[in-house]
Amino acid sequence: MASFQGTKINPTRFHVSQLKFYLLLLPLAAFMVMPIVFIVSHAFKPMNELFAYPPRFFVQRPTLDNFRLLFANITTSGIPVSRYLFNSLVITLITVLATILISAAAGYAFSKKKFRLKDTLFEINTLALMFVPIAVAVPRYFVVVKLGLIDTFAINILPLLAMPVGLFLIKQFIDQVPNEMLEAAQIDGAGDWTIFRKIIIPMTMPAIATIAILAFQVAWNNTEPSTLYIYNESIKNFAYYMSTFTATNNEVAGQGIASAAALIMFVPNVLIFIFMQSKVMNTMAHSGLK
Amino acid sequence: METKPNLAMQAGVRTVAAPGTRGRLKRWMQKEGTAYLFLAPYLTFFLIFIVLPVAFAIGLSFTSFNAIQLPKFTGLKNYIDLFTRDSVFMQYVLPNTLKFSLIAGPVGYLLSFLLAWVLAQIQRAPRTVLALLIYSPSLTIGVAMQVVWKTIFNGDPTGYLNSLLLRYDLIEQPIQWLQSPDYLMGIMMAVTIWSSMGIGFLAMLAGVLNINAELYEAGYIDGISNRFQEIIHITIPAMKPQMLFGAVMSVVSTFQAGMIGVELSGSNPTPQYAGQLIVNHIEDFGFIRYEMGYASAISVVLLLIIYLCTKVVWRLFSEKE
């Protein structure tokens, strides 16, 4: 085997020949991560450093002033910032849990059940992978109006629950669960609901983690409902608050607060991904389209 | 959550089944009913928030509708106007969209694949860290990024890029990056490419890592002699499904990034329409001028463009010949 000089994909040990890859990756990764470092550094800058000339990339004397200002800030309509943050947390939590349940249930049906429209419906879902919500913002608005969902808290959540990518990924993953296992459970008298709860859910945790991350990102960063469907300030979310902030007073006093808000927006995204990354990679191995 | 779809399900079944077919209905419920029960919540939301809006868009696109009076059927007028009268669309919006999606999309995709492949060549621990760093920008596309890019490309001398260029005498006057028609499009593409290592990138990374090592050995016996040949003859064919998934995701995220010009410049329309993409044009007519019928026609055109792009991608990577 010593003569085999082929690929060393996923090597277990360091070898000098890998140096060239590091040489390419390290500068690139540093470049990619620069704006993130910028967000972090910016959020802790005191006022005089935010407007220093020439500007400095890294913070010299870090302070929590920006965060204090952010939470002391009350919008013109009298809503404290913590309210937006609380809304975002509730919206995100419900969206993630509901999306997981709905996608896993549908994925189970598509993967293990037989019904006449199965292939057609899954084909339609695959087509919907390319669905771009903002393309149909106008008719979606009318649907929301007709359903009487304008200015309700639920509209923050409902449009996000059908996630074609999520269903697609979890269905591919449930395909890996051996049918014999389900048959054995059936012989033991387990119904569909028991099978779903006791076998499907535990065995598809990696896919569920992936959907959790995707749903989290969509819900946490979503400004669409707050911008288009909600007038009542007290049920809007943090991402919306952040977007009005950067749009209106991005130049002067708002800078510090905006960067603190940006950091708050960003950190949960990264944390949830770090927490679940190994599971994500596991799911992605089954992500192929044929 | 379970009872409601359940009732809806039975109601739906009753209307479908002919009278006197109780037994058949019962058998159907046993055989297929539970499947639909598990599907019902997903299908409900899918219908309401994805299928219905698309159907509405198609319907409204043949009407004149100002959101106050009832829609008036006007046939193909919106489409004809769009391609013959709307000089902004033909002169700026369509070329901009094509330029943006044909450059930012493929470049982002190729970069995703290359980085995924290179990452697969190193050990696990450093790979995880580097993958996270490279993936992290895609987490923040949109809202949080405005702080970064608006500060970096600020038009004052204190803007990061301006100050850097001024210091080394590369420019004499600060440049209004985000307000200048010459630079806006370039910056939009750079930001989009920078954040394009998202879910498709992860799929391709997993794809490269999961290729069976024996395939490579066999390849080398058959006369492959370098890494480039290895990529062309083994890696890409072996991970075609992931390549396709990544490509579809790349098309989608490129078009989904359509608001970026407006977000960066802070105005719709963007300065001299330099960064105007179809998505902004839709918003301009739909939510600013309230010409909903016309906006819907533009939506339909956009959906068709996305569909065509995906079809092309599918052709390129699909295993079905």
Image: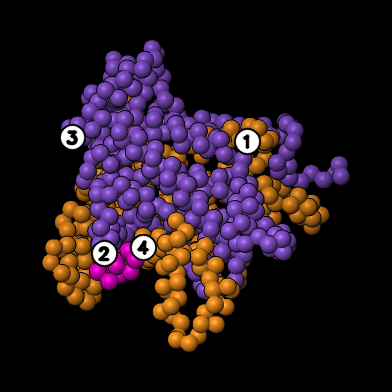
Q: Residue at x 30, y 33 (%)?
A: A83
Q: Nearer the viewer, mark 2 or mark 3?
A: 3
Label 1 residue SS: helix
Q: Which residue is mark 3?
A: A77
Q: Quadrant of the N terminus of chain B?
A: bottom left
- Amino acid type at circle 1 is Arg
Does the CB distance between marks 1 and 4 fall below 8 Å?
A: no
Q: Chain of mark 4?
A: B
Q: Chain A colour?
A: purple
- Residue B1 on the magenta segment: no
What is the x, y in percent for residue A264? 39, 30
Label 1, on which residue?
A: B127
- Quarter holding the C terminus of chain B is bottom right
Residue with the most extreme left position:
B69
Of the residues under marks 2 and 4, which one precedes in the sequence?
4
On the image, the x and y values in percent for residue B215 come to 75, 54
Q: Colour of chain B?
A: orange
**Disc 3 versus disc 1: distance between alpha carbons?**
48 Å
The mark found on residue B48 in the picture is 4
Alpha-carbon distance for marks 1 and 2?
Answer: 45 Å
Can you tell which quarter of the image residue A114 is in?
A: bottom right
- Looking at the rendered structure, the secondary structure element under dot 4 is helix
Point out the residue furthest to the top here. A61
